């Protein structure tokens, strides 16, 4: 799976890690619904860190279609809210 972190680039991530990311995505969605800005910041950072840790960055000159697009680390709660589907940022 190719994941794009806005403002950073793309990462190749094995599908086996999607369950771990979905757990963080569920937490992020709950914090957003509760208006918990501090929790939102912490969990968004954790989600992006997990993608960076578990994935392999693609070289800048290699551009692949992204299957998943995640917000930049400094994205606001409102910006992320606009990116959400019913399942959160990560489908499934």
Image: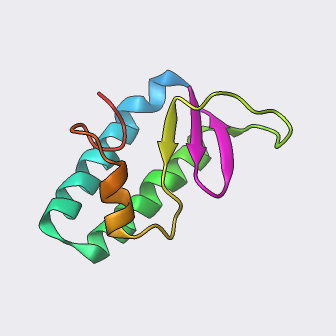
Q: Quadrant of residue 12?
A: top right
Relative side of 61 to 53, left or right: right
Residue 75 position in % (x across, y down): 46, 67
Q: Which residue is found at the position 23% from the left and 53% from the top?
A: 29
Count of marks overlaid on the render: 0
Residues 70 and 50: in front is: 70
Judging from the image, the colouring scheme is: rainbow
Identity of the residue furthest to the right in this view: 61
Relative side of 37 to 49, left or right: left
Residue 84 position in % (x across, y down): 31, 47
Would you say the magenta stretch is mainly helix, strand or loop?
A: strand
Q: Which residue is found at the position 30% from the left and 76% from the top?
A: 38
Q: Check residue 5 for magenta coloring.
A: yes
Q: Quadrant of residue 80?
A: bottom left
Q: Which residue is found at the position 57% from the left and 37% from the top?
A: 3
Relative side of 17 to 86, left or right: right
Residue 54 position in % (x across, y down): 57, 40
Residues 14 and 76: in front is: 76
Tell me the magenta residue range.
Answer: 1-12
Placement of 16 over or under 74, stated as above or below: above
Q: Which residue is found at the position 28% from the left and 40% from the top?
A: 85
> Is the N terminus in the top left, top right, bottom left or bottom right quadrant?
top right
């Amino acid at each position: 799976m190719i994941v794009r972190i806005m403002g950073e680039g793309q990462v190749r991530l094995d599908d086996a890690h999607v369950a771990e990311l979905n757990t963080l995505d569920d937490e992020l969605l709950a914090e957003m619904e509760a208006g918990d800005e501090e929790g939102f910041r912490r969990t968004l950072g954790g989600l992006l860190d997990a993608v960076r840790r578990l994935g392999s960055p693609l070289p800048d000159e290699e551009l692949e279609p992204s299957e998943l697009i995640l917000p930049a680390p400094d994205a606001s709660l409102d910006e992320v809210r606009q990116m959400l589907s019913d399942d959160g940022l990560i489908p499934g």
